[in-house]
Image (cartoon, rainbow, N blue to C red):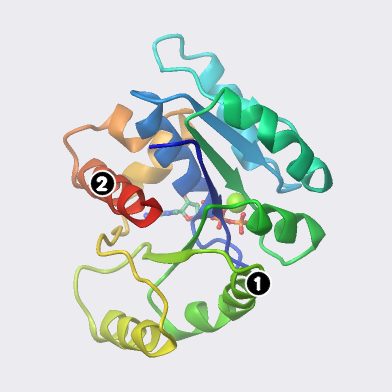
Amino acid sequence: MPPSIITIAQQKGGAGKTTLVASLAAAWAATRRVTIIDIDPQHSLTRWHGLRAARKSAPAITLAEIAGWRLAGELDKLRRNSDIILIDSPPQIDTDARQAVRAADLVLVPIQPSPPDLWAAEGTFGLAQAEKRRLAIVLNRAPATGKLRGMVEADIARLGHRLLPTVLGNRTGFATAFALGLGVTETAPRSRAAEELRSLLADIEGALE
Ligand SMILES: Nc1ncnc2c1ncn2[C@@H]1O[C@H](COP(=O)(O)OP(=O)(O)OP(=O)(O)O)[C@@H](O)[C@H]1O
Ligand SMILES: [Mg+2]
């Protein structure tokens, strides 16, 4: 796979963007050179990376500290030293978020399966469309079954967006791993959460092809 830039974006707060970036980065770091960029002023991903630095056995991940407005200029340099670049964006559409979407080979949008969460993502879909970027949706914190999930899946199909086949459940393992500066494939490699994450990784690689 050539170097890929994946921006995780969703205007709605708390959709799972940062948790997802961390778990994806940690899983890819086992075999690839991973760079993460945190353009969210909350800086949760930066703090996660700080926790990780204390874990000497965890494969290293590079944190590139770049303001959104400098992104385009810095990315070419980063591409040379990374296989995968993951950008975590803030829960709003501002100039920085726009830059991050513009730079992406794939815009990954986590959505909790309920209609208001899908509605809240419309601005993010519009941004990806305006920037002509490839977009994929991943359902996050989904209950095992349920009517709501079916409704949201149907709405996504109607909108014509790509929905990745893997669905992430509502699993504390993701949050626990994050609190330790790790990813779920590192803290609990045999868990359902880790299985889902690995499956999502394969979906994303497919979407990038
Ligand atoms: N699959 C999951 N299962 C259980 N909890 C989850 C899952 N994904 C995320 N969470 C939890 O949901 C909360 C919000 O997650 P996170 O901070 O990653 O969202 P965010 O989209 O980055 O938020 P913000 O918009 O504020 O940046 C956190 O407490 C996190 O631990
Ligand atoms: Mg976040």
> Contact, CB < 8 Å: mark 1 with mark 2?
no
Q: Is residue 43 left or right of residue 142?
A: right
Q: Nearer the viewer, residue 206 or 55?
A: 206
State the residue at coordinates (36%, 51%): 209
State the residue at coordinates (42%, 29%): 182
Q: What residue type is disc 2 on?
A: Ala
Location of residue 9 by image quarter: bottom right
Q: Give the structural element (helix, strand or loop) at label 1.
A: helix
Which is more N-terminal, label 2 or label 1?
1
Q: Nearer the viewer, residue 104 or 109?
A: 104
Residue 193 is tagged as 2
Q: Give the structural element (helix, strand or loop) at label 2.
A: helix
Question: Is residue 20 placed above or below 179 in the rendered structure?
Answer: below
Total numbered circles: 2
Q: Is residue 22 left or right of residue 126?
A: left
Q: Position of residue 11 (x, y in %)?
A: 63, 68
State the residue at coordinates (73%, 67%): 93
Q: Position of residue 20 (x, y in %)?
A: 45, 48
Quarter of the N terminus within the rendering: top left
State the residue at coordinates (71%, 48%): 40
Question: Is residue 175 placed above or below 17 in the rendered structure?
Answer: above
Question: Is residue 65 placed above or below 144 in the rendered structure?
Answer: above
Q: Residues within 10 Å of mark 2 (few under 14, many from 20)?
A: many
Residue 127 is tagged as 1
Question: Is residue 154 placed above or below 166 in the rendered structure?
Answer: below
Q: What residue type is disc 1 on?
A: Leu
- What is the CA distance from the residue labelled 1 to the residue labelled 2? 30 Å
Q: Position of residue 8 (x, y in %)?
A: 54, 54
Q: Note whether ligand 1 is within 8 Å of mark 2.
A: yes
